[in-house]
Image (cartoon, rainbow, N blue to C red):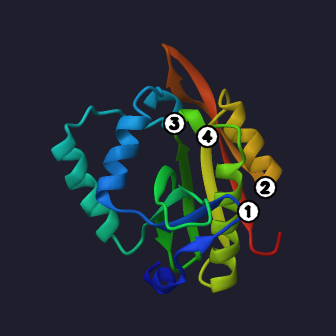
């Protein structure tokens, strides 16, 4: 993913994407804390102190198989108001695939910021030639994420039955993908 370093920032209509800092990751953790983490992941959830979070962010940012991008409001000036992030994890050079994740501040939901950010990120990855498949996993009850992925052109590849615990009940998870040829 290091080959993309010189591509940023990417300026879009109402946002721009840029490599994110550990401080901005910590800021987003605080702003998005009201969200239930159980909605966003089926993995075990561990509460972390700010110091523990910064250590984790440092590892993620240094891992050459990850790329974390900030979603910033674009007002035509040099303002850098962070409102969300796009995360690319576990890049596999052999099969040219990467996992996609995203989060936006609750006050910015429903404004098209994430859709624009994900579309631009996918475009960049496919144009680079280093990625053939981008995939994402989401819970069957997370309709906003499912609808976003479908609107962008992702297809459902798999259903993981009773894979995601939420409030004591097990739900299915879906794995979506978008290919360079789609």
Residue 165: x %, y % from top left: 50, 24
* Rendered residue at 74%/45% (across/down): 148
Earlier residue among tags 3 and 4: 3
Q: Residue furthest top?
A: 168
Q: Say if mark 1 contacts mark 2, CB within 8 Å.
A: yes
Earlier residue among tags 2 and 4: 4
Q: Quick check: 155 left or right of 55?
A: right
Q: Nearer the viewer, residue 26 or 41?
A: 26
Q: CA distance from mark 3 to mark 4?
A: 7 Å
* Rendered residue at 78%/55% (across/down): 152
Q: Which residue is mark 4?
A: 138
The part of the image, by quadrant, that contains residue 147 is: top right
At mark 4, the secondary structure is: strand
Residue 7: x %, y % from top left: 54, 82
Q: Which residue is mark 1?
A: 178
At mark 3, the secondary structure is: helix
Q: Say if mark 4 contacts mark 1, CB within 8 Å.
A: no
The part of the image, by quadrant, that contains residue 31 is: top left
Q: Is residue 24 visible?
A: yes
Quadrant (top left/top right/bottom left/bottom right) for the C terminus: bottom right
């Amino acid at each position: 993913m290091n080959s993309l370093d010189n591509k940023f920032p990417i300026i879009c209509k109402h946002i721009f994407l840029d490599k994110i800092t550990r401080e901005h990751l910590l800021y987003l953790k605080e702003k998005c804390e009201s969200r239930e983490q159980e909605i966003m992941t089926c993995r075990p959830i561990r509460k972390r102190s700010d110091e523990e979070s910064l250590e984790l962010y440092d590892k993620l940012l240094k891992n050459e198989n990850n790329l974390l991008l900030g979603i910033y409001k674009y007002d035509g000036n040099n303002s850098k108001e962070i409102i969300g992030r796009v995360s690319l994890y576990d890049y596999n050079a052999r099969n040219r695939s990467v996992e996609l994740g995203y989060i936006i501040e609750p006050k910015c939901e429903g404004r098209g910021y994430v859709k624009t950010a994900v579309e631009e990120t996918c475009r960049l990855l496919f144009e680079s030639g280093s990625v053939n498949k981008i995939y994402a996993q989401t819970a069957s009850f997370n309709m906003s994420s499912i609808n976003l992925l479908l609107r962008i052109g992702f297809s459902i590849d798999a259903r993981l039955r009773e894979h995601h615990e939420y409030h004591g009940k097990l739900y299915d998870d879906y794995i979506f993908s978008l290919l360079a040829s789609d």
